[in-house]
Image (cartoon, rainbow, N blue to C red):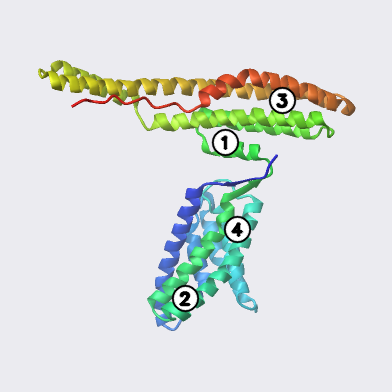
């Protein structure tokens, strides 16, 4: 098992940062007006809260509570007699933790580790942003007017938004499990259900294997289970790639174009034009055959994914006897079971690896002038 780090939902992080910058820009305009009225706004609070309110994608059941918490809780550190930038750091950490916890737009709250990591990162980056703001004001933009206030608020929002990055980063000690969890979150339809099923079976098998006494047989069995799960995920990835290819083209439209070109070729009187239209129809016909080949391969991959998941199910059932046996005999049983599962897996991997290979696009037919 190897350490794996996954950057999940990159688009969500990027859009959240852009929304945070937009919210801070709006608050920066109000901050410039407040400065003209001799009532300057604290960027360590107002920029952070504006960025958090704009960046959070709130589920309907949490909308009121989260927005109220984002306004109230970051203000609490400013009521205590502490040295700067401690209040600003705590405000940034509080807002980042709330956004990572309930502000991703999902019905499920964030996990404790990403929430804590986001809070810690934002708590460090907000004071750094305030220092950068002071440097920019001292050397480039000055201290009064719309531009200095806007630059300061945007700087704080940018650093705070970067601090929320750990909410989209997941670290796994098991790279196979991390790969399966990512696929289960990204796939759609039947392939997603099968990938989630394969992930659950892999976790169950791995838990049984890890409870066995340490031995060479246990290591071999664990490697076989990991290989079986990895092959399932490889087939699921190949199926997803074919789905993406086929989703961008509608076979019926291509078929209709082929029929239209052939009917035009039959109706035209000019021999050169007829030849051009026939060659164009032939070229599109090759593309249609290529789509048919992709469709058949997609169906085979789905069937192979079913078979691979069934193989994992057989492995899980095979572990039932191992769990009921004596602990001292498990080392020998593990080696024997590993060899049996390996032989079963080798029987099913050859066609799977062949179908998982990319399909070469057809050579286009050159239309002569």
Q: Give the residue number, with chain letter if any, for mark 1.
A: 184
Percent x, y of residue 67: 52, 60
Name the mark nearer the viewer: 2 or 4.
2
* 100 relative to 35, above or below: above
Q: Classify the position of the C terminus by image quarter.
A: top left
**Secondary structure type for disc 3:** helix
Q: Give the residue number, with chain letter if any, for mark 3.
A: 316
Marks 3 & 1, CB-CB < 8 Å contact: no
* First of labels 2, 1 by sequence position: 2
Is residue 260 visible in the rendered image? The answer is: no
* First of labels 4, 3 by sequence position: 4
Marks 2 & 3, CB-CB < 8 Å contact: no
* First of labels 2, 3 by sequence position: 2
Crowd class of label 4 (few under 14; some 14 to 19; many from 20; radius 10 Å): many
Per the model, the C-alpha gap separating discs 3 and 1 is 20 Å
Q: Give the residue number, with chain letter if any, for mark 4.
A: 118
Residue 136's label in the rendered image is 2
């Amino acid at each position: 098992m190897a350490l794996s780090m996954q950057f999940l939902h990159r688009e969500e992080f990027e859009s959240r940062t852009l929304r945070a910058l937009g919210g801070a820009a709006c608050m920066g305009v109000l901050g410039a007006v407040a400065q003209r009225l001799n009532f300057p706004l604290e960027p360590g609070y107002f920029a952070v809260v504006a960025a958090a309110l704009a960046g959070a994608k709130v589920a309907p059941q949490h909308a009121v509570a989260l927005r109220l918490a984002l306004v109230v809780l970051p203000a609490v550190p400013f009521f205590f007699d502490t040295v700067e930038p401690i209040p600003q750091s705590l405000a940034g950490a509080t807002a980042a933790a709330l956004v990572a916890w309930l502000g991703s737009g999902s019905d499920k709250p964030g996990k404790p580790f990403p929430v804590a990591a986001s809070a810690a990162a934002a708590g460090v980056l907000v004071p750094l942003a305030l220092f950068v703001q002071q440097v920019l004001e001292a050397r480039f933009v000055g201290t009064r007017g719309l531009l200095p206030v806007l630059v300061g608020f945007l700087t704080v929002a940018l650093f705070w938004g970067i601090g929320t990055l750990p909410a989209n980063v997941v670290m796994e000690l098991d790279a196979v499990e991390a790969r399966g969890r990512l696929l289960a979150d990204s796939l759609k339809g039947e392939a997603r259900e099968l990938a989630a099923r394969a992930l659950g079976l892999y976790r169950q098998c791995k838990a049984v294997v890890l409870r066995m006494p340490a031995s060479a047989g246990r290591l071999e069995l664990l490697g076989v289970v990991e290989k079986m799960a990895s092959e399932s995920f490889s087939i699921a990835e190949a199926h997803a790639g074919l789905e993406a290819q086929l989703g961008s083209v509608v076979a019926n439209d291509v078929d209709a174009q082929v029929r239209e070109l052939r009917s035009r070729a039959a109706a035209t009187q000019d021999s050169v034009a007829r030849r051009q239209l026939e060659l164009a129809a032939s070229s599109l016909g090759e593309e249609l055959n290529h789509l048919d080949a992709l469709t058949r391969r997609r169906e085979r991959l789905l069937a192979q994914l079913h078979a691979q998941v069934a193989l994992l199910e057989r492995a899980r059932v095979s572990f039932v006897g191992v769990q009921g046996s004596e602990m001292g005999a498990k080392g020998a049983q593990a080696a024997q079971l590993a060899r049996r599962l390996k032989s079963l897996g080798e029987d099913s991997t050859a066609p799977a690896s062949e179908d998982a290979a990319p399909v070469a696009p057809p050579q286009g037919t050159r239309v002569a002038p």
